[in-house]
Image: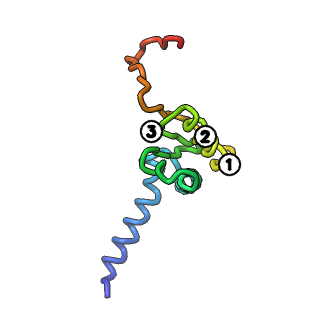
Amino acid sequence: MAGRGTVVALAVAIGLVLTGCQTVTGRGMGQWWEDKATTAKVKTALAGKRLGTLTRIDVDTYSGTVYLTGTVGSEETRREILEMAESAAGGRRVVSHLVVAGETVPAASPGAPRQAR
């Protein structure tokens, strides 16, 4: 059986983790859980349609905004994945950083003006 000191130390550690979450991430525990649930919904929707997307597309949610990052095979696939993510996100904003394989993404230096395409 664990000693009283071990139980107290464990309780303090759990308290620090729960309260420290907002300090480290800038989000409260409720927002963190909501973000995790949204990420899971989007990943499930994408996996249901295209199982291979789980390995090529990263889904992350931060403060209610869903971010998609990765490489896809075509512009049509990029649009389809974005639409599925928006539907699964339940009205949350979805930001796509999806790149079509073979496209070059221009590197921008900090402070450099963006060029029109």
Name the amino acid type tagged 1: Gly
Horizontal arrangement in the rendering, residue 78 relative to residue 109 (left or right):
right
Q: Earlier in the sequence, mark 2 or mark 3?
A: 3
Q: Which residue is mark 3?
A: 70
Location of the N terminus by quadrant is: bottom left
Element type where label 1 sits in the image: loop
Q: Amino acid at mark 3?
A: Gly
- Which quarter of the picture shows residue 82? top right
Above or below residue 7? Residue 31 is above
Q: Which residue is label 2 attached to?
A: 80
Rendered image: mark on residue 99: none
* Residue depicted at x 43% and y 64%: 15
The percent coordinates of residue 59 (x first, y second) are 49, 46
- Which one is in front in this view, the residue at disc 3 or the one at disc 1? 3
Which of discs 2 and 3 lies nearer the camera? The answer is: 2
Q: CA distance from mark 2 to mark 1?
A: 16 Å
Q: Nearer the viewer, residue 67 or 13?
A: 67
Q: Residues within 10 Å of mark 3 (few under 14, many from 20)?
A: some
